[in-house]
Image (tube, rainbow, N blue to C red):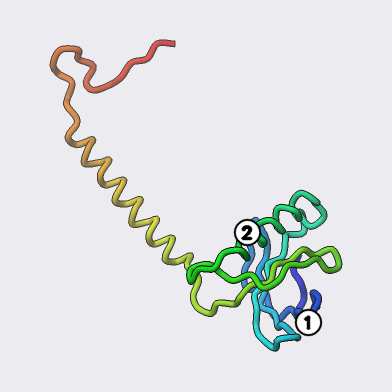
Amino acid sequence: MNLEEGTDLGPYSIRELLGSGGMGEVYRAKDTRLKREVAIKVLPKHLGDDPKAHARFQREAQSVAALSHPNILAIHDFGRENGVSFAVMELLEGETLRPGMVFLFTQQAQHWLGSQVELLGRRPSGSGKGGGGGRVAARA
């Protein structure tokens, strides 16, 4: 979609792209009515004209807006302007979680791999009855 700086979606003025992914793009924007910074998520261009995608996007915004919890973003508004479906939410400043998630995944993967290698090291040799050297044969 790549909205340009200064593009207006209703009372929201786009400032900059914060991130993008398969389910949309998130922009920093200015709420011109309440004079505050907000985050705006828009559907990606390839889903913009899909009525089912728009309906799902709206249901998700309504579902999240019905929740109130410190670990869930507040949804302030939802709309469609000039063919762009968007959800307006609170803007949280800080770092992305991606590096931490990659580190956590890497640590878990290393732990899992280490445990598998350890298990393989303890595997019986298969030299007793039944033989096979620990291999499994399958028939077609």
Quadrant in the picture for residue 5: bottom right
Which mark, by number, is residue 63?
2
**In terms of secondary structure, where does tag 2 sit?**
helix
Question: Which one is closest to the eye, mark 2 or mark 1?
Answer: 2
Q: Residue at x 64, y 56 (%)?
A: 22
Q: Where is residue 112 shown, x and y percent of the image?
A: 31, 46
**Residue 37 higher or lower than 118, as above or below:** below
Q: Is residue 11 left or right of residue 37?
A: right
Q: Where is residue 121 shown, x and y percent of the image?
A: 19, 36
**Residue 99 higher or lower than 28, as above or below:** above
Which mark, by number, is residue 6?
1
Q: Residue at x 28, y 21 (%)?
A: 135
Q: Residue at x 15, y 12 (%)?
A: 129
Q: Is residue 47 left or right of residue 68?
A: right
Q: Nearer the viewer, residue 69 or 8?
A: 69
Q: Residue at x 69, y 79 (%)?
A: 29
- Give the Cα distance between marks 2 and 1: 29 Å
**In terms of secondary structure, where does tag 1 sit?**
loop
| Other-residue count near label 1 (Cα within 10 Å), few / some / many at <14 / 14–19 / ≥20 | few
Q: Nearer the viewer, residue 102 or 15?
A: 15
Q: Is residue 110 left or right of residue 80?
A: left
The mark nearer the N terminus, 2 or 1, is 1
Quadrant in the picture for residue 124: top left
